[in-house]
Amino acid sequence: MLPLLLLLQVAPAVPAASSAVCSGTFVYSAPFAAWTSAKASNAPVIGAATDIAPVPVADAKFVTAPDRAAKPGTGAVVAGFDVPVVGIYRIAVGGAALRPKGIWIDVVAGGEALKSVAHEEGPACSTIAKVVDFDLPAGHYTLQLAGIPDPSTPVRVLILPKG
């Protein structure tokens, strides 16, 4: 009996499946307060949420191949944006049809995809799927999104300075 008891004491707990039940309306507060006031556009603007229409991934004109290849039939976005001052910038993407593991976010400068400095899923019960941070000098960049599950549904993008 003692060995079984010891086994139960050292056996790791199995985490419960994530099935968050959301009640009520999610409140988008800092830093994502601008998330709910998106405007349709072809390109994101720092500090403003933008709904961008994707194209089928087969039609996307990527500057460089995405770091993770998108599945056929998914959508993509290739859009320029300007960073006014050096800093770490958070790129949040989402929408009702997006799941965090499906979409890939790249920032390209000088024909090269930049390495992210952090990434996380969006807040539980929000429509933010993923947030990725990049350390960016002032300048012009290309945002590449790949693996958008539904290429007929706009993707919401919000780029913010961190901090």
Image (cartoon, grey):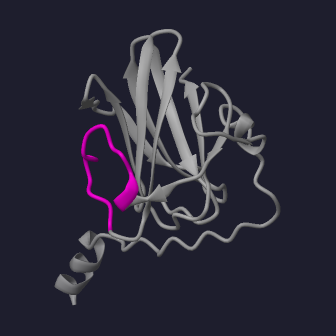
Q: Is residue 11 above or below residue 79?
A: below
Give the residues in magenta.
Answer: 58-71
Residue 154 picture location, percent across and down: 62, 55
Residue 42 picture location, percent across and down: 59, 39
In the image, 113: left or right of 122?
left
**Which residue is found at the position 78% from the left and 40% from the top?**
37
Q: Is residue 52 above or below residue 114?
A: below
Asked if the stretch drawn in magenta spans residue 128, the answer is: no
In the image, 131: left or right of 41?
left
Residue farthest left in this picture: 3
**Which residue is found at the position 26% from the left and 57% from the top?**
69
**Which residue is found at the position 29% from the left and 30% from the top?**
114
* Quarter in which the N terminus is drawn: bottom left
- Nearest the viewer among 158 and 150 is 150
Q: Is residue 65 above or below residue 29?
A: below
Q: Is residue 75 above or below residue 63?
A: below
- Nearest the viewer among 90 and 44 is 44
* Quarter in which the C terminus is drawn: top right
**Which residue is found at the position 65% from the left and 32% from the top?**
31
| Rendering quarter of residue 3 | bottom left
Residue farthest bottom in this picture: 1
In the image, 42: left or right of 82?
right
- Nearest the viewer among 2 and 94 is 94
| Rendering quarter of residue 143 | top left
Number of numbered discs: 0
- Nearest the viewer among 6 and 130 is 130
Asked if the stretch drawn in magenta spans residue 70, the answer is: yes
Residue 43 picture location, percent across and down: 57, 35
| Dominant secondary structure, magenta | loop
